[in-house]
Each structure stands twice: as structure tokens, then as C-alpha cells.
Amino acid sequence: MAVHNQTLYNEKDLLTLASQANEAAFTSLFHIHRHKLYGFVRRLTESDMLAEDIVQDVFMKLWSDHTSLCNIENFSSYLFKMSRNHVINHFKRMAHETLIMAEIYGQKPAGYNETQDIIAVKEVEKILAQILEKLPPQQKAVYHLSREEGKSHDEIADLLKISSNTVKNHIVQAMSTIRTKLRGHADTLLIFIVLLALKK
């Protein structure tokens, strides 16, 4: 069954069809979300080409595992979390390549400990969760809608019944708090990577 007009289907219908290998439904999902997703990744990476590549990679990964699409409750949120993970993984690969080159030329960073860095992955997640939990309620809600679900300032303002300027201020304050707190733990390479991904 071809999906010629995406407005005739709600997102859950499209996900169900796509999970059954319906390429037209999957293409509709791609066109619905790609621009907002690209903008989200572009803000994180500050690279047009990299943002395009990551968005393509995300949808290719989704298609390769299309049978699970019907189990996704909030596709938009799922997309943005997946994209954010791709960005983090990209920075991790860059850092790893840098370390390899440094080792080849006998310039391994002082104090680098591979075992500690591996252990730090879960610690970073724990630290971020703790920082977010301590944000003021509205600031935390704005951050979640912006960074986790990729919503625009106007969309967030409409949802929370506040002005766009208030939304912007909350995001600026939240990001400042997160970066400041993370720098207090910046003794691992992974924290540095996360700080890069949190650039405005």
C-alpha cells in the first residue's frame, strides 16, 4: 500500500506500516522529521555536512531495524535521543583517533588512563542525570523539550504557556549550569567530549 498523502495517516499508522517494510510510510516519516532533526544535529555539531551524514545514518539504522518501529511510543523523542547518541559517538571516535595518533608519535596525553575512561561512561550519565534533576522545574522542562525532543522555542512556549524569550533564557541558564557543573568533573576525556556536544 502506497502512502501518497501523509496527512491521511497519523504517526502511529506510519510506524506500523514502516515496521512491515512499507517504504512509502518510512519515507513519509523521514520527510516529516528530517528538517527539525537536521537543525537539532546541526546545532550540536556546527557542521552542515556532518549533520546531513548523521541524519542519514539515523534513518538508515532505523530502516535496518524497521520491524521494531511499531514498538516506539514517542517517535520524535526517540529520534532526537538516537541522534544525540550518534553525535556523542562521533566525538568519541574523533577523540579515539586523536589518541591513536598521539600514541604513534609518542605523545599520549598526560594522565590518560584507558580503564578509567571506560569506567567513566556510566559515571558521566549519572552526573548528567544528577545535574538535570537539580535544575528548577520549569528550566528542566524547557531543557527536556529542547534537547531531548528537539522542539523549537515557539513550540515550547506554546506548550508551557510562556514567552519565547523566557524559553531562550531557561535554555541559556540550563546549559550554563550543566557546563559549569561538568567542568568540575572534567578529569576524563569523556567529560570533554560531552562538553563539546553541549556547545550552543
Image (cartoon, helix red, strand yellow):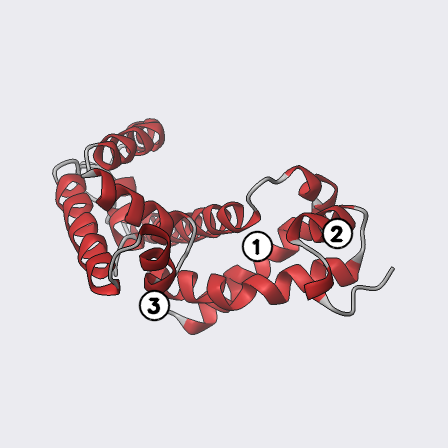
Name the residue that disc number 2 marks: 18
Q: Regarding mark 3 in the picture, which secondary structure is present there? A: loop
Q: Is residue 109 left or right of residue 79?
A: left
User: Label 3 amino acid?
Assistant: Glu
Which of the two discs, 1 and 3, labels the residue nearer the N terminus? 3
Q: Establish if 140 lies above or below 162.
A: above
Disc assigned to residue 58: 1
Task: Name the residue: 32% across, 62% down.
Answer: 153
Residue placed farthest to the right in the image? 1
- CA gap between label 2 and label 1 equals 15 Å
The C terminus - image quarter? bottom left
- CA gap between label 1 and label 3 equals 18 Å
User: Label 2 amino acid?
Assistant: Ala
- CA gap between label 2 and label 3 equals 31 Å
Q: Regarding mark 1 in the picture, which secondary structure is present there? A: helix
Image coords of residue 134 (percent x, y):
19, 33
> Mark 2–mark 3 contact, CB under 8 Å?
no
From this viewpoint, is residue 100 visible?
no
Name the residue that disc number 3 marks: 46
